[in-house]
Image (cartoon, rainbow, N blue to C red):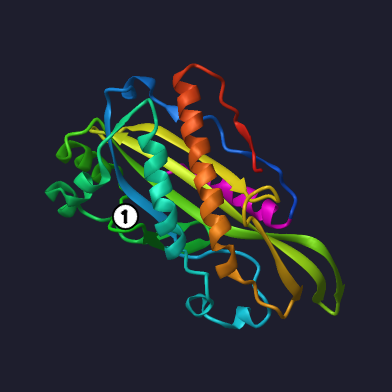
């Protein structure tokens, strides 16, 4: 998505800290909202729902010698497909927009003929392919967003991107570079939303980071006993979908609070 590089760097640093069990808070800044662009009578369409292809996280020794495509559960396509309805449902429930029905958007000639941006993301030292949710296109260029807003005859268009990773914790001891002990694996989600108006101006931009915790259904899976044992990414898919849905709810709550003139925290709790 078209998020500032400084914000992406902050998020990347937070993810690294989370993966090492060092962070419970994240600095994401306040929600960037043009209040005049939103309201109950403002029509919006969701035009892009995407995710980096790789479910990132610690891998077992044998997994490190494999291509990611050969490791079950590393591809995020099933996760973004299952998260997609939660995203639409959350946006559709906002009192600050009127969401055009998804089926109408996807079936329109404007969307079918829209230019799709390359399904590749490059930022700093990270490069990854992009997965898109069911029947969506990947839109990242501001002018492609703006053209869709005009062609769909709406006040604004929205893109949502979600990236997923795994953090681990627990007790372990180390011998000759190998780790032994019991570990718990936590699914994490970074979800970002961006909205453009018909002129290609950003009217909403926000991000949040959420990590599963013991109170979340299917949130923590404890199964790793040695560094040779591979991370069971597939088992973490349900919690990734669930925590992704909670992250989307947080974004909408922050939008609603901003519109209502309530303070929105620049430092967010991860759990």
**Whole-percent x, y for residue 12 in the image:** 58, 51
Q: Over which residues does the magenta segment extend?
A: 1-20
Residue 12 colored magenta?
Answer: yes
Depicted 77 relative to depicted 106: above or below: below
Does 191 appear in magenta? no
Measuring from the top left, give residue 229's x and y in whole percent.
Answer: 70, 78
Q: Secondary structure at mark 1?
A: loop
Q: Which residue lies under the disc numbered 1?
A: 138
**Residue ID at (65%, 43%):** 270
- Residue nearest the viewer, comparing 201 with 166: 166
Q: Is residue 253 visible?
A: yes
Residue at the limit of the structure toward the front, as seen here = 217
User: Is 104 rendered above or below residue 31?
Assistant: below
Residue at the spot 65% in from the left edge and 55% down from the top edge: 16
Residue 194 percent location from the top left of the image? 39, 39
Q: In the figure, is residue 155 to the left or right of 49?
A: left
């Amino acid at each position: 998505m078209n998020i500032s590089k400084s914000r992406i760097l902050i998020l990347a640093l937070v993810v690294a800290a989370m993966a090492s069990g060092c962070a419970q808070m994240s600095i994401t800044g306040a929600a960037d909202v043009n209040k005049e662009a939103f309201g109950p009578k403002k029509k919006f369409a969701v035009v892009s729902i995407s995710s980096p292809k790789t479910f990132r996280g610690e891998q077992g020794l044998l997994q490190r010698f494999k291509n990611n495509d050969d490791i079950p559960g590393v591809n995020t396509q099933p996760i973004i497909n299952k998260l997609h309805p939660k995203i639409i449902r959350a946006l559709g429930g906002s009192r600050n927009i009127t969401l055009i029905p998804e089926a109408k958007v996807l079936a329109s000639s404007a969307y079918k003929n829209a230019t799709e941006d390359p399904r590749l993301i490059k930022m700093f030292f990270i490069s990854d392919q992009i997965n898109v949710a069911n029947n969506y296109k990947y839109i990242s260029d501001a002018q492609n967003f703006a053209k869709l807003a005009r062609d769909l005859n709406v006040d604004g268009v929205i893109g949502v991107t979600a990236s997923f990773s795994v953090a681990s914790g627990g007790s372990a001891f180390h011998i000759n570079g190998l780790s032994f002990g019991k570990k718990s694996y936590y699914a994490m989600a970074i979800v970002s939303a961006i909205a453009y108006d018909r002129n290609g101006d950003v009217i909403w931009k926000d991000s949040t980071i959420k990590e599963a915790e013991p109170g979340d259904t299917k949130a923590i899976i404890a199964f790793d006993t040695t560094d040779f044992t591979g991370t069971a990414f597939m088992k973490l898919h349900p919690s990734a979908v669930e925590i992704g849905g909670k992250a989307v709810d947080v974004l909408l709550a922050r939008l609603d609070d901003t519109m209502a003139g309530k303070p929105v925290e620049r430092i967010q709790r991860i759990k």
